[in-house]
């Protein structure tokens, strides 16, 4: 559609090819000649399907996260990164600090991040992955201890 963006008539004809079943039903039910310029069509579509839009999370959402008692590092980091990815803007520097501060004070990863701070997202993710592997190995060791021969 970007190639034909100057030809409104063509844009209106091509537009339905990008729609799913629910949206195509809506489009098919529009009265003939009820919408003239392509801009009107996109506005009508947006107002009808506004619930499908992804709303960016505010920075306070990230600041309010913390690892819960009994939660695995994997579960927490998955939750953290999902929230982080829902935010608009560049909050990488904030993520470097908030992830550490959201961990329990006695967590090995927090101690590691305090002793040897990371300076970029790749380092943070690498360090998290290292501690997730340690946690997984510890859990597997506990599971073996529970097996009765």
Image (tube, rainbow, N blue to C red):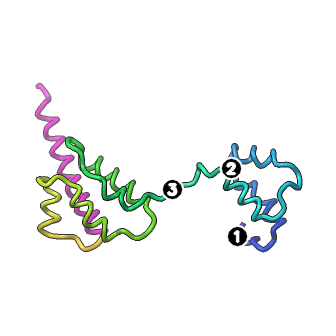
Marks 3 & 2, CB-CB < 8 Å contact: no
- Could you say where residue 86 lies in the image, as x and y percent from the top left? 44, 58
Please tell me which residue is depicted at 11% across the width and 67% down the height of the picture.
Answer: 115
Depth-wise, is mark 1 or mark 3 nearer the camera?
A: 3
Residue 2 is labelled as 1
Q: Quadrant of residue 35?
A: bottom right
Residue at the far front in the pictured view: 60
- The correct choice, above or below, for 93 with respect to 127 in the image is below
Please tell me which residue is depicted at 59% across the width and 49% down the height of the picture.
Answer: 51
Query: Residue beneath label 2, please?
Result: 48
CA gap, disc 3 and disc 2:
16 Å
Q: Earlier in the sequence, mark 2 or mark 1?
A: 1
Q: Earlier in the sequence, mark 3 or mark 2?
A: 2
Please tell me which residue is depicted at 26% across the width and 62% down the height of the picture.
Answer: 98
93 falls in the magenta region: no
- Could you say where residue 20 lies in the image, as x and y percent from the top left? 68, 48
Of residues 132 and 45, the one nearer the viewer is: 45
- Could you say where residue 48 lies in the image, as x and y percent from the top left? 68, 50
Residue at the far top in the pictured view: 148
Depth-wise, is mark 2 or mark 1 nearer the camera?
A: 2
Q: Secondary structure at mark 3?
A: loop
Q: Secondary structure at mark 2?
A: helix
């Amino acid at each position: 559609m970007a190639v034909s963006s100057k030809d409104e008539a063509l844009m209106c004809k091509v537009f339905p090819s990008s729609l799913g079943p629910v949206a195509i039903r809506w489009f098919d039910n529009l009265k003939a000649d009820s919408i003239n310029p392509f801009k009107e069509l996109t506005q009508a579509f947006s107002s009808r399907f506004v619930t499908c839009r992804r709303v960016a999370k505010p920075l306070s959402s990230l600041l309010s996260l913390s690892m819960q008692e009994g939660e695995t590092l994997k579960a927490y980091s998955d939750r953290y990164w999902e929230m982080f990815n829902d935010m608009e803007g560049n909050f990488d520097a904030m993520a470097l600090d908030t992830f550490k501060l959201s961990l329990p004070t006695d967590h090995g990863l927090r101690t590691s991040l305090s002793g040897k701070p990371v300076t970029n997202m790749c380092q943070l993710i690498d360090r998290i992955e290292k501690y997730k592997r340690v946690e997984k190995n510890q859990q597997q060791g506990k599971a073996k201890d529970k097996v009765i021969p």
